[in-house]
Image (cartoon, rainbow, N blue to C red):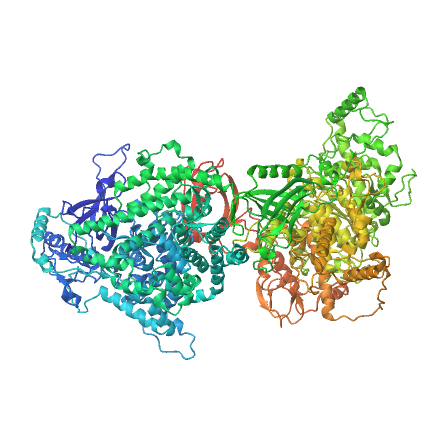
């Protein structure tokens, strides 16, 4: 029996503490005053009586009641029922001590109301009874009833005793009367305990929780609680907090919440919420501001029905299909009409259950969910001890493995929680009291089966289960009317209420003592007995979850192969076993096959040790390793546990007395380091031993049956089974599939034995009980000894010098679930006598000892092993380890003497002529990487990788050559190689197990190449670590040569030193000459003038020394520039020789000057000339010697203005348009200090001359620009063109195509003056005569991605009848100039052209453009390589190949280059304007843009010769830094690889794919160049500029006698070079092979006569990934070394001749990743030429060259046909060209608009679905939109059209301009109508209105339309380490935001604060780091859920006004 209540407490307001400034309560009285022995009094009770804090009130409050939960030190819960009311107190005002007071003055008193609480503390949860009892006490007090309070309190504490839940009388179990009592106040009360103590009582709490939160939030909250998350409720009602907390805990039944549980947390204890452990707590809503900063707490707002989940918290979801089934059931209960709402005939409304019944139905759903979630858990319980107390554990890995939920986060967290640990401890014993969950769990599989057959049965089952739960709470249906007196209504508000009296504690104690002494009530219940214990039903077995028979049938063939292989091994048929061994390894990926393997091997063990031959032993070990490798470290399938006895049984004899067991070869698996695995396996074996200890007395009746069925000997087994095969487990399983009893004989389980033992335990004598205890303890102890030895076997490595073989940190926290941290072994047991000295145990031995000792402590302590036995175990372990290490030393020594296993022969790689092997091949294994090609996986085909072979380092390559490990593909050769110079990263990886060879590869290297090759190799065990280190050092040495002369391009041939530049005399022939030269050079570097022997006059200008480019180490001696000039000038033919190079010869073709240097007279008639001003490379070291400039520009002028550009790379003419005569120029960017001003001058120059030099430089710069403009035909016209051409020929026509013209600011400086505002003012002055401009295009987004968008700006101008422009008066001169065509467009960087004075450069436009810097290219290339050649399989399937390519941003960079080049093409071709590229240093992006533009403009550059000329001029002569960007030498390694040239080739590839008929060369030609520009095989792409190549002596080499370098016979495959002393060139190589074969020829090439301009589509959707990045050839390696491929093919053909002709057909199987598709399946032209050559050979004719055959073909005669194109075709072609020009205008407009003006086009579109009746194109992707086929969307404001899928990527640049031209025809007709408009058009009203709407968004008055509650300037403090800044703030009560702007004129919001997140706004003082001259009272803070904001107003009044306004919005 239990007391109804343990304590009665009176708690009041502490007025003494209130006078000291604190408000708190104090316990006034408590009864009894002495603590009960079984229930001590809980301290701090006053805090829980007023959780929100004790405070006085000015008004009387109604009495309140709630229950707090207190938890004692033992974890027991006590319930504190509190009834609070208010009493009157008088407060006397006090004055400070320092104030003068009048002693006679009256003391002022105020009347306040203080709270007082009466509370009952009890261990029982009868909340309603507590409410009634406290209400009676309060009623007696307030109504002055004639009852003593002492009597009432004494009766509650001492006289009323109630039974606990579940202990009812027989009549009550049958539904008898409740327990009825009275406390002596004329009351009648009844109390009804629940039937079961384990089932929680909820009333209606669960139903109320679901009504408040809803199904989804409630399920999320439940998942968070059951997975141990921190949960915090807040509400204004204490009762709601109690009920919600109790509901969520009750839903967890049958689990118990074992963490911190405080439903009502006092404000004073809020620090508890920072605890790291999980909790469920509740606080009053008044404290929610204090909980806003909690980072990992899930906050539930019960009043607002919301839940806040922090970003760092992830709640796992309930696994499917359990979640769906639970959701459906809850919906059926809470929203029954939802399931029938779609019925055609509405059924009658469902009958809604009452709230208590609904509560039980919801709980029934969750109870069923747990029964389904824990299905099979009892079969995973492991019994360790039965006596004296049962100890049971749970095999988590076995449960998850059979349920196939190893990766399920929800179930894993549930099983790891403390609640499930308590669940196993309480519900694990097989003989105990059972409750509802046990019954539901046992019958749920059958129930679920019935529901699947009949879904209508689920509501019935839920209702029945809910009825059981309801009866548990309300077992007696007999009504009983209680009598509870209550106070009259409003009694609490009476004026004169007496205070609660002081209770007489003596009287109460007498009543308590009298009640305890009485035995009448207790004797009444003395006959009560608890529910009887019974055997717990087992429920479904875990093996029944999956259909085992179905799995076995699917794996029948694999198991048959596995059994045959094992039989072959033990029958010593090794050759037969090896044939099917690969199939067995693949079969072992199946769980069933792995388990069957262990059973099959166990069958073949006839004795305790199975001695095997060496080959048998090796194969068995490989099988064991493969089985372990395919399993996880959890061992969820039990494979490792089954292998344990096998590893200690199989062995082989090494020599006399030395035997090697299999465990020495299977140690390198992570499972052996898993402490949980050892514990679970140990407990499994202990259970088997415990069962065998008691089983004989329960299974005697089974022995006879077993003896009849079991054979007496193996011989009888053979005779009875027919053969040994059929007697194996697999054979017997197959043979007796139909006999279920024979397959699984009936046997009693360990839990059944334990249940019977627990039942008879009380009837045994003490001696019998002690004997059983001793037997079980001895069993556990002996098994612990056995497992300690097993762990030593598996943990000590064979070679102790190499350390532990798997990842284990024994010092770290154990992975076990054990809470034991202090190990006996780590304290004093190791120091005990163990027979071995501590020094004898090595470091590895000590680690193993600690690991085993920790295991022993854990299992022995839990299993009840005595302390003496544990100490003996700890003393034994060091000795076992030491002896085992000593034994393994001999085993390791003898195992090394075994003959090595036969391995494949190392294949030598085919070498190039001159290529030598630097390091002989090391045996390695080529491992698979992230590419699926060649692995034989999902891509299909043979498993070519992994492969076994050797890795070689040559002077040129890193090459792997070997054969596949898969025997089915072992006849093929696998080659993977790349040039050493292309190595970008070498990385060492962790050890990896390779199942094909059964070997752990310790040393693994990953070599990545910039040619998109990746070699991942693992060194064989025969390769020592020293060889691996040598390999790595040698690799880095060859990769990083000192100079380019050490690369293969030179070392591969017999070379001499470069020819000296001065041939007549050595440079330093004497000491005097050496000293002179040194001094002269030093003086020049120091800036001292020296006399020049060749100078005849003084120079007017002093030029600074041009910056010296970083060298690549071409020569060890510094060659003087004057010496180069002297060398070139010494022979006039040197310049002529230089001019013969293809790049220079192209100048004459373009008409840019005559290459005639013999005649000194200048040809004045020519417009341009070839200048040799840089012949000595003195003006710019990185420029070519010969440049093209206008005829009027002198060399002296060039020397002067060259200083205004970086690296002195001044503008040079690169190309000239043949029709428009427009020029294309290239230069570097202007100096950062300005284009003309602030040049660096010589420090010795007189001060007075500096200004003059700057002025002269500026003048010369202007003259040069004037000369360029004069050379442009467009620049010679005095005024812009008076007419506009058609849209196909002029860029301006695009403006006209939408009836608009553009008014733009002249320069970026004007744009900074708010050009939009200026246009608005002009619009107002003009009377609004404006019309809209059509969509032009956006530029790029934040990621620098150029997309085609809509950009609508401009003012409608009037036009005359002849088409000329009439500028209204409101347009000033600068705007008029913006409308004119510029003769020269300068594309530069934003930061460099902003200070340009445009007035000095008439007819010039400076356009700042955006481009990708080199650092962005480097980062993008790295990401692209990881995407195309991943190092490992992709872990996240969502981040696939295409996603990674997108994240690399490689394609947007290509798009950027193509769009900038397209702008150059349009300006040169359509407009006839010259273009100057002035970006960065002029050798990266400038070269890319110029080269691509020339390819698009000039068909000559699309031929092989022309492409060579382009590369020679733009890339080599103009100084692209190949050595620096490609890291060719050691000095350049730190800069990183930058694939600038590769990007250019990729752009050419994109153009080639769009225009395949326009190029003479094919795509393989581009791949060839992409490979060899970094391979260092040719000298062509070496060194950084022409000057360095001149120093190396490469440019003026003469054609000498040729020499063959490949030793080919008859010159068939040989290659002849120029002078071998200077290395080969790639152009000679290409020319030679192009003459021999059409390998570089594009047979589809159609040469066009005349002009052919290409305009490729630069949209991302039109770009593709280059196959060069993702393709490879494993048969021969990269196909770009043609000699190697030819030799490999020749070797194959010779081998075929030796082997004889194969009798095969013409059909061939081609593997894309292995074979060369171009060679195996050539195109028609190549195949036809091969056939002609074959036929010529058969006819003994002389073979003709392919070019002669190709040129001899007759071209098909074509007739000129006039084709009438359809409207759709015309529109499509027009649209494509218009898009190209849109991009050009987009770049120009974006460049002309600077700063914030460009940002104003950041408005989002308002899209709506739209059906298009005419063909329309998507403005984003340029694909077709058609209403009948595809439905698109259109912006209702600006008319932007796009697909729905394109909408997320559309830039937010809507101008909010409604289109008024939707009904007009297409853009072609618009262009025509625009040209034919009258001279004075009248703008319609709609157009004027639309234009006003457009410009209204950019004016400062546009924000007046917003709902601005308050606005003004405030100082805002930035984030951490940032200062104060003034911002214009706008408080918007409609959008509930506080936005800030840079200024009042700013139209774009810079940020905002969501007021819904604001929790508090208050004044703040003493702010640190405030600005000067600020008011200290003007600071206020705004606290949000994310951070704290601090503001400063103009004064205190302003700050207070802001606070009031903000509080008004948030309240």
**Callout count:** 0
Residue 1697 in sight here: yes
Q: Nearer the viewer, residue 1154 or 1062?
A: 1062
- Does residue 359 appear in the picture of this structure? no
1947 shown above or below 1108: below
Name the quadrant containing residue 1113.
Answer: top right
Furthest toward the top, the residue is 1072
For the view shown, which residue lies furthest in the bottom direction? 345
Q: Which of 1936 and 721 is in front in this view?
A: 721
Task: From the top left corner, tell me how far across and down residue 1867 is, in percent.
Answer: 71, 65
Residue 1845 vs residue 1127: left or right? left
Q: Is residue 1586 left or right of residue 1437?
A: right
**Left-right relation of 9 to 1872:** left
Where is residue 1618 shown, x and y percent of the image?
Answer: 82, 42
Task: Give whichever of 1948, 1349 is nearer the camera.
Answer: 1349
> Where is residue 98 drawn, in percent x and y?
28, 32
Q: Which corner quadrant holds the C terminus?
A: bottom left
Point out the image quarter for the N terminus.
Answer: bottom left
Q: Nearer the viewer, residue 112 or 460?
A: 460
Q: Which residue is drawn at 43% across and 75% down?
A: 342
Above or below, 1837 relative to 1149: below
Question: How far across and down, in percent of the image, does residue 1673 sit?
Answer: 66, 53
Q: Using the rendered view, name the quadrant where residue 1029 is placed.
A: top right
Residue 1075 found in image quarter = top right
């Amino acid at each position: 029996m239990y007391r109804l209540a343990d304590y009665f407490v009176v708690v009041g307001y502490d007025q003494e503490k209130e006078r000291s400034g604190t408000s708190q309560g104090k316990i006034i009285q408590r009864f009894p005053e002495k603590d009960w022995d079984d229930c001590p009094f809980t301290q701090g009770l006053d805090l829980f009586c007023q959780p929100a804090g004790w405070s006085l009130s000015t008004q009387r409050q109604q009495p309140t009641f709630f229950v707090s939960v207190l938890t004692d030190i033992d974890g027991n819960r006590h319930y504190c029922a509190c009834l609070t009311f208010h009493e009157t107190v008088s407060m006397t005002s006090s004055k400070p001590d320092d104030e003068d007071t009048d002693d006679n003055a009256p003391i002022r008193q105020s009347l306040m109301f203080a709270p007082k609480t009466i509370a009952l503390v009890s261990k029982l949860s009868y909340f309603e009874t507590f409410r009634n009892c406290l209400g009676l006490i309060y009623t007696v007090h307030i109504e002055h009833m004639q009852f003593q309070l002492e009597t009432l309190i004494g009766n509650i504490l001492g006289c009323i005793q109630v039974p606990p839940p579940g202990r009812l009388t027989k009549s009550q179990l049958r539904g008898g009367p409740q327990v009825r009592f009275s406390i002596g106040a004329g009351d009648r009360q009844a109390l009804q305990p629940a039937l079961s103590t384990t089932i929680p009582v909820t009333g209606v709490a669960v139903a109320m929780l679901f009504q408040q939160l809803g199904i989804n939030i409630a399920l999320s909250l439940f998942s968070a609680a059951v997975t141990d998350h921190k949960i915090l409720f807040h509400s204004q009602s204490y009762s709601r907090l109690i009920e919600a907390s109790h509901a969520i805990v009750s839903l967890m039944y049958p689990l118990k919440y074992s963490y911190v549980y405080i439903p009502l947390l006092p404000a004073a204890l809020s620090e508890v919420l920072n605890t790291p452990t999980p909790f469920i707590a509740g606080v009053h809503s008044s404290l929610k501001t204090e909980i806003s900063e909690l980072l990992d707490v899930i906050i539930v707002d019960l009043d607002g029905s919301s839940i806040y989940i922090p970003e760092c918290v992830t709640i796992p979801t309930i696994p499917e299909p359990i979640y769906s089934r639970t959701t459906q059931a809850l919906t059926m209960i809470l929203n029954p009409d939802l399931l029938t709402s779609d019925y055609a005939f509405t059924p009658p409304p469902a009958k809604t259950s009452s709230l208590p019944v609904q509560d039980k139905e919801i709980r029934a759903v969750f109870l069923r969910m747990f029964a389904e979630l824990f299905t099979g858990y009892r079969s995973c319980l492991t019994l360790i001890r039965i006596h004296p107390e049962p100890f049971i554990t749970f095999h988590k890995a076995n449960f998850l493995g059979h349920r196939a939920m190893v990766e399920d986060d929800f179930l894993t967290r549930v099983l790891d929680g403390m609640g499930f640990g308590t669940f196993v401890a309480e519900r694990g014993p097989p003989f105990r009291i059972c409750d509802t969950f046990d019954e539901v769990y046992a019958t749920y599989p059958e129930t679920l089966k019935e529901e699947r057959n009949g879904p209508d049965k689920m509501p019935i089952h839920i209702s029945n289960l809910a009825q059981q739960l309801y009866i548990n709470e309300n077992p007696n249906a007999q009504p009983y009317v209680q009598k509870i007196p209550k106070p009259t209504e409003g009694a609490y508000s009476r004026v004169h209420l007496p205070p609660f009296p002081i209770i007489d504690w003596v009287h109460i104690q007498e009543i308590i003592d009298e009640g305890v002494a009485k035995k009448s009530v207790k004797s009444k219940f003395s006959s009560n007995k608890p529910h009887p214990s019974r055997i717990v039903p087992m429920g479904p077995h875990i093996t029944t979850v999956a259909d085992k028979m179905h799995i076995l049938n699917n794996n029948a063939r694999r198991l048959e192969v596995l059994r045959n292989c094992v039989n072959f091994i033990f029958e010593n048929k090794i050759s037969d076993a090896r044939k099917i061994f690969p199939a067995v390894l693949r079969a072992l990926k199946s769980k069933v096959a792995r388990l069957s393997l262990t059973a099959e091997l166990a069958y073949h063990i006839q004795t305790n040790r199975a001695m095997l031959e060496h080959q048998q032993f090796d194969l068995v070990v490989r099988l064991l390793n493969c089985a372990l490798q395919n399993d996880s470290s959890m061992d969820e399938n039990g494979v490792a546990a089954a292998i344990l006895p096998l590893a200690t049984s199989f062995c082989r004899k090494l020599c006399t007395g030395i035997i090697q067991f299999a465990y020495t070869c299977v140690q390198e698996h992570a499972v052996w380091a898993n402490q949980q695995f050892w514990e679970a396996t140990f407990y499994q074996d202990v259970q088997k031993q415990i069962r065998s200890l008691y089983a004989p007395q329960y299974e005697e009746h089974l022995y006879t049956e077993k003896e009849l069925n079991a054979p007496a000997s193996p011989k009888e087994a053979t005779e009875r089974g027919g053969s040994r095969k059929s007697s194996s487990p697999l054979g017997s399983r197959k043979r007796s599939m139909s006999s279920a009893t024979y397959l699984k004989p009936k046997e009693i389980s360990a839990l059944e034995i334990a249940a019977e033992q627990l039942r008879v335990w009380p009837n045994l004598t003490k001696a019998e009980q002690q004997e059983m205890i001793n037997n079980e303890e001895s069993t556990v102890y002996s098994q612990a000894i056995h497992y300690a030895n097993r762990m030593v076997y598996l943990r000590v490595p064979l070679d102790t010098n190499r350390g532990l073989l798997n990842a284990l940190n024994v010092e770290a926290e154990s992975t076990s679930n054990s809470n034991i941290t202090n190990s006996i072994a780590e304290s004093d047991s190791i120091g005990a006598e163990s027979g071995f000295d501590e020094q004898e145990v090595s470091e590895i031995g000590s680690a193993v000892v600690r690991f085993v000792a920790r295991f022993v402590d854990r299992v022995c302590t839990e299993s009840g092993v005595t302390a003496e036995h544990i100490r003996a175990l700890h003393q034994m372990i060091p000795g076992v380890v030491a002896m085992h290490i000593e034994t393994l030393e001999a085993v390791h020594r003898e195992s090394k003497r075994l003959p090595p296993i036969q391995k494949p022969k190392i294949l030598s790689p085919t070498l190039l002529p001159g290529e030598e092997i630097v390091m002989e091949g090391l045996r390695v294994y080529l491992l698979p990487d992230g590419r699926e090609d060649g692995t034989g996986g999902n891509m299909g085909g043979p498993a070519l990788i992994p492969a076994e072979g050797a890795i070689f380092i040559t002077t040129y390559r890193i090459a792997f050559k070997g054969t596949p490990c898969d025997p089915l593909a072992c006849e093929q050769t696998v080659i993977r190689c790349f040039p050493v110079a292309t190595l970008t990263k070498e990385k060492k990886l962790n050890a990896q197990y390779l199942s094909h060879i059964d070997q752990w590869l310790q040393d693994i290297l990953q070599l990545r190449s910039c040619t998109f090759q990746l070699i991942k190799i693992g060194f064989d065990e025969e390769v020592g670590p020293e060889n691996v280190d040598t390999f790595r050092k040698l690799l880095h040495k060859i990769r990083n040569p000192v100079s380019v002369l050490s690369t293969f391009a030179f070392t591969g041939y017999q070379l001499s030193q470069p020819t000296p530049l001065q041939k007549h005399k050595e440079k330093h022939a004497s000491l005097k000459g050496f000293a002179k030269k040194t001094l002269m050079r030093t003086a020049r570097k120091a800036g001292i003038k020296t006399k020049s022997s060749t100078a005849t006059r003084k120079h007017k200008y002093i030029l600074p020394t041009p910056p010296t480019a970083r060298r690549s180490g071409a020569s060890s001696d510094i060659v003087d520039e004057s010496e180069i000039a002297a060398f070139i000038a010494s022979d006039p033919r040197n310049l002529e020789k230089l001019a013969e190079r293809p790049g220079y010869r192209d100048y004459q073709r373009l008409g840019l000057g005559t290459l005639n240097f013999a005649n000194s007279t200048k040809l004045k008639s020519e417009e341009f000339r070839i200048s040799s001003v840089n012949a000595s490379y003195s003006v710019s070291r990185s420029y070519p010697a010969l440049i093209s400039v206008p005829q009027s520009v002198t060399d002296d002028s060039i020397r002067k203005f060259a200083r205004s550009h970086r690296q002195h790379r001044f503008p040079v003419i690169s190309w000239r348009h043949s029709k428009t005569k427009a020029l294309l120029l290239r230069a570097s960017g202007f100096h950062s200090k300005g284009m003309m001003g602030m040049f660096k001058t010589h420090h010795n120059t007189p001060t007075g001359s500096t200004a003059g030099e700057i002025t002269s430089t500026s003048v010369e710069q202007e003259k040069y620009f004037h000369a360029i403009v004069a050379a442009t035909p467009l620049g010679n016209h005095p005024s812009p063109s008076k007419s506009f051409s058609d849209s196909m020929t002029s860029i301006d026509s695009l403006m006209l195509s939408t009836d608009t013209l553009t008014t733009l600011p002249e320069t970026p400086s004007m744009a900074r003056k708010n050009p939009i505002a200026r246009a608005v003012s002009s619009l107002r002055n003009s009377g609004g005569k404006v019309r809209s401009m059509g969509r032009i295009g956006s530029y790029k987004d934040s990621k620098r991605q150029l997309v085609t968008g809509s950009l609508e700006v401009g003012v409608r101008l009037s036009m005359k009848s002849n088409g000329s422009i009439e500028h209204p008066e409101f347009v000033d001169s600068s705007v008029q100039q913006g409308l004119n065509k510029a003769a020269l467009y300068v594309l530069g960087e934003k930061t460099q052209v902003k200070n340009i004075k445009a007035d000095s450069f008439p007819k010039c436009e400076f356009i700042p453009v955006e481009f990708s810097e080199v650092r962005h290219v480097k980062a993008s290339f790295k990401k692209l390589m990881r995407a195309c050649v991943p190092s490992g399989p992709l872990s996240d399937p969502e981040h696939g190949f295409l996603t990674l390519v997108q994240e690399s941003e490689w394609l947007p960079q290509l798009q950027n280059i193509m769009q900038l080049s397209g702008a150059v093409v349009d300006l040169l071709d359509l407009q006839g304007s010259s273009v100057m590229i002035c970006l960065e240093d002029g050798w990266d992006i400038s070269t890319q843009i110029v080269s691509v533009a020339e390819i698009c403009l000039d068909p000559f550059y699309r031929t092989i010769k022309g492409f060579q000329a382009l590369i020679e001029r733009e890339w080599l002569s103009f100084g692209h830094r190949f050595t620096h960007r490609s890291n060719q030498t050691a000095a350049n390694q730190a800069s990183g690889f930058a694939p600038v040239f590769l990007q250019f080739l990729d752009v050419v590839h994109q153009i080639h794919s769009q225009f395949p008929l326009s190029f003479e060369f094919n795509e393989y030609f581009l791949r060839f160049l992409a490979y060899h520009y970094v391979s260092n095989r040719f000298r062509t792409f070496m060194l950084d500029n022409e000057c360095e190549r001149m120093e190396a002596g490469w440019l003026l080499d003469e054609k000498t006698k040729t020499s063959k370098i490949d030793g080919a016979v008859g010159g068939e495959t040989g290659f002849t070079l120029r002078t071998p002393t200077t290395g080969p060139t790639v152009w000679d190589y290409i020319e030679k092979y192009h003459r021999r074969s059409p390998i570089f020829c594009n047979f589809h090439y159609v040469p066009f006569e005349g002009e052919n301009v290409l305009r490729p589509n630069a949209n991302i959707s039109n770009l593709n990934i280059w196959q060069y990045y993702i393709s490879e050839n494993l048969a021969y390696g990269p196909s770009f070394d043609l000699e190697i491929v030819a030799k490999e093919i020749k070797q194959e053909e010779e081998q075929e001749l030796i082997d004889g002709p194969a009798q095969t057909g013409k059909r061939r199987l081609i593997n894309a990743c292995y074979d060369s598709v171009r060679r195996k399946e050539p195109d028609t032209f190549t195949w036809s030429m091969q056939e002609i050559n074959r036929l010529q050979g058969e006819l003994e004719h002389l073979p003709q060259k392919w070019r002669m055959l190709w040129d001899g073909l007759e071209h098909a005669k074509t007739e000129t046909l006039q084709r009438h194109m359809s409207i759709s075709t015309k529109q499509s072609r027009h649209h494509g060209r218009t898009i190209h020009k849109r991009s050009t205008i987009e770049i120009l407009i974006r460049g002309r608009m600077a700063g914030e003006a460009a940002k104003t086009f950041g408005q989002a579109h308002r899209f709506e679905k739209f059906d298009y009746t005419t063909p329309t194109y998507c403005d984003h992707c340029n694909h077709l939109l058609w209403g009948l086929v595809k439905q698109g969307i259109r912006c209702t404001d600006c008319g932007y059209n796009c697909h729905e899928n394109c909408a997320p990527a559309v830039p937010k640049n809507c101008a909010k301009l409604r289109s008024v031209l939707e009904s007009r025809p297409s853009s072609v007709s618009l262009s025509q109508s625009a040209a034919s408009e009258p001279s004075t058009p009248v703008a319609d009203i709609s157009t004027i209105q639309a234009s006003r709407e457009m410009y209204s968004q950019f004016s400062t008055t546009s924000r007046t339309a917003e709902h601005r509650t308050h606005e003004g300037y405030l100082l805002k403090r930035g984030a951490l380490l940032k200062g104060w800044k003034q911002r214009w703030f706008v408080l918007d009560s409609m959008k509930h935001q506080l936005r800030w702007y840079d200024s009042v004129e700013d139209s774009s919001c810079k940020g905002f604060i969501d007021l819904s997140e604001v929790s508090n706004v208050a004044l703040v003082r003493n702010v640190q780091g405030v600005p000067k001259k600020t008011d200290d009272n003007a600071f206020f803070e705004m606290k949000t859920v994310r951070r704290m904001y601090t503001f400063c107003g103009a004064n205190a009044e302003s700050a207070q006004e802001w606070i009031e306004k903000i509080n008004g919005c948030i309240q």
